[in-house]
Image (tube, rainbow, N blue to C red):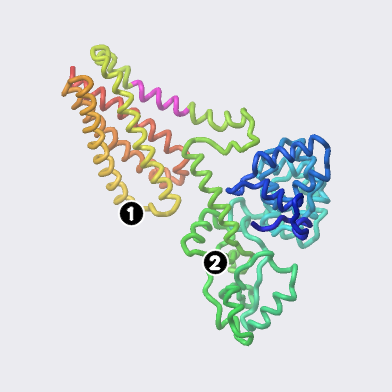
Amino acid sequence: MTGPSGDMANKPASVDEPQDLEDIALGENYELTPTYVDMVIDAADKGDVERLRELVQALRPEDVADLMGFLSSDYREEIIPLLAPEDLAEIIAELDTKLREEVLETVAPATLARALGELDSDDAADVVDDMEDDQRDQVLAAMSDVDRAAIETALAYEEETAGRLMQREVLAAPQFWTVGQTIDHVRNSGDDLPELFFEVYVVDPAFKAQGAVPVSGLLRAQRDKLLSDIMEPVTEIPVGMDQEEVAYIFDKYHLISAPVVDASGRLVGQITVDDIVGVIQEESEEDILALAGVSDAGRDATVIDIVKSRLPWLILNLATETVAVSVIGAFQAEIAKLVTLAIIMPIVASLGGNAGTQTLAVAVRALAGRELNAANAMRIVRREMVVGLFNGATLAAVMALAVYLLFHDPRLSLTVGLALVVNLFVASLAGILSPLALDRLGRDPAVSSSVFVTFVTDFTGFLSFLGLAAIILL
């Protein structure tokens, strides 16, 4: 395991040193242990500042950010003053949005300015964007002209675009430079270079990227080699491109980094794979939550916040289900004559709902991964129709046999079997057509597809079963 951050990293480990504390703090899955969290709370309750400092400094900034989520605001206020500016910057950048906003309110603008100066421009801009206007003005005023300009430029781009995602710090070199000149420049530039970079972008006099030289290739080449002789083509990212599109490009072309260019093609920044990992996780979480009709509650969400995010979709679902069950009212006489129908009817509707949800989940994932589009939509729709028929026929056979063994009525078995075939076929069709239609209309297919699919499967399940029962049994 990598050693702890800060000054503690340089001290030899002993029985009571933070390295041992780090072992106590993190479990096998790198999750904070209840024992460690209790130790932090106990030190804070006792007012033991030195012990609290020792406990916190034993962790990396990312783990301290995780710790903040397990503590109340009072405990967080005791820990924040103990953090070095460079650690505070990384910790704030790792916090969830709501928790970050709360922490930012407790830190002085001058301290924040020093801390943000330790971050790359993209991370610093992300933090500044979460500040209140007054605090933002104070923090920016306390920053250096260079750092302030970088953040203000990043904030000028729309949210969730490449411009917001990129860091302005890049390593660029002219075409006529040699490998030796480039290496010497890297060694001499020091803090002016990006903290993390994988490629040297080769630019022309207009600062347009002509190619890139991977750092590994740079170190292997002879010093007198021209960069233009060893550079490779680059995949440019337009500054206004949506971050989800950027993530798709990184995944498709297996990129580690990519140059970001403005409308004129001029190099304005770079995006690295560590930024994309966060985007992919964020977009995946959004799709999963949207598919269920909820938003991210988070550890600090209140009951009111959660209710507000979930209740509207439940109300919409109530409205659609009211329409669906109205079918039952139309067959009251038939149900009164044969009470068995009321026992079996929910099974037919439930199986259809599950089948529709299966198809919907696969379709939404395929749309997000660009595996489903206009080029293959009809083939995928036909495939899901066949799957629906096959699953329906298989379940129909099993259910019909079970009903016959229970009620000894072959006509009832036939009714159930036919209803299942119809409902699972329609469920598969609704599960694939609903997200396709929403995507074609420019809407997020994950947001409202589930409500529509549930309505269709319940309505069809009730109608097909009771309709067939009225024809076959009564």
Q: Amino acid at mark 2?
A: Glu
Give percent across and percent down for residue 277: 56, 55
Residue at screen point 34% across, 56% down: 375
Front position in the image: 17 or 236: 17
Label 1: few (<14), some or many (≥20) within 10 Å? few
Q: Amino acid at mark 1?
A: Asn
Does 325 appear in magenta?
Answer: yes
The residue identified by callout 1 is 376
Residue at screen point 66% across, 83% down: 180
Front position in the image: 174 or 187: 187
**Can residue 88 be seen in this snapshot?**
no
Magenta segment's dominant SS is: helix
Image position of 396 (left or right of 211) = left
The residue identified by callout 2 is 236
Residue 398 position by quadrant: top left
From the viewer's perspective, is residue 209 above or below residue 195?
below
Magenta residues (range): 316-326
Does 221 appear in magenta?
Answer: no
